[in-house]
Amino acid sequence: MEQITIPSDRDGVAYLYGHPLRNSLSPPLHQTVYNALGLNWTQIALSSANGPSYTQSPDITTFLSSIRSNPKFVGSSVTMPWKVAIMSHLDDLTEDAQQAGACNTIFLRKDSQSETSYVGTNTDCIGIREALLQNSPTGPDHFRGKPALIVGGGGTARTAIYVLRRWLGSSKIYIVNRDAAEIETILAEDKQRNAGGSGVAPLVPISDPAVAATVEAPVAIVSGIPNYPPKTEEESRARETLKVLLGRQPHGVILEMCYHPVPWTDIAQMASDAGWKVILGSEALIWQGLEQARLWTGTDVVAVPGLVEQVKEFVAKAVAERAKSNL
């Protein structure tokens, strides 16, 4: 793909950059926002078919040169495989992008001389934060000073660690993951990013169910792994460790970030059976999308009457339809 579409019939265009994009809810979610605001805007997925089930997006140089020369460009979502690679090519990065170690959003910033900067941020931070806070049993301070748990060792884990520290005030953060090397990488990155570590909630890997039975119970969990049954010994051990932690008292809330192809995963069922309140990952999708829309439109979209409800209704319907098609 060499040419990037600039629609002549639209006043503004946002992009979705990465691949594969065929199942993304981002363009219709943003269209719901634009329609509600009366904006003649659209979001276009930048990928082209490359075989029956694979899509390819343009390289970073092609993408950035195009948006910089596009007078209708308002912003872009960024997905894999570009979320880390694109960071060094942008004019500036927010603290959220730096701390999460990934960029999922580009927005425009103008200085006093009307010079435009292309800034990277990570609205997944806002998505995770709001999904947890909006579903807190007793308000925003429910999680403060108490342990939390991360399941996984990828980008979602890194983002969740930052959120749990900055906004939820977790006292410590347990990590359960099948791959010890991934955990070591997270620990090394975290040590470098937070040199000194003073006042920072410590990361505590747990790989033994027996140890899980002795630690202080977490009140918040963010799970960021695919919905596959455990097959290897390491996967089975991680799942058993999680099961023990889910059985601890008191129970809290779990955000299950995996919602595709089905919204209700094996881990969601385990947590529900154990008495935990389950928050679907589509909830985080909604709030991160609304934050993107705020950055791109300059409008406090959450304050627009009925808009959040429209977006939630669309996402719930879309997720339900996709789950039904995968039965």
Image (cartoon, rainbow, N blue to C red):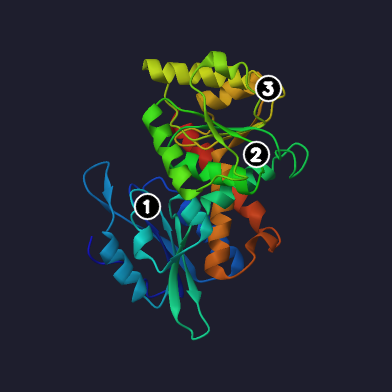
The residue at 50%/61% (across/down) is 94
Q: Mark 1 vs mark 2: give the one in front.
A: 2
Q: Of the numbered discs in the image, which one, if any, rests on residue 275?
A: 3
Outermost residue, top side = 210
Where residue 172 sits, quadrant-wise, is: top right
Q: Residue at x 51, y 48 (%)?
A: 194
Gap in angstroms between the C-alphas marked 3 and 2? 21 Å
Q: Residues within 10 Å of mark 1 (few under 14, many from 20)?
A: some
Residue bearing mark 2: 170
Q: Which mark is residue 84?
A: 1
Name the residue at the right extreme.
Answer: 138
Q: Amino acid at mark 2?
A: Ser
3 vs 2, front mark: 2
What residue lies at 76% left-to-right and 43% top-to-bottom? 139
**Dot 3 and dot 2 residues touching (CB under 8 Å):** no
First in sequence, mark 3 or 1: give its number.
1
Q: Is residue 179 above or below residue 20?
A: above
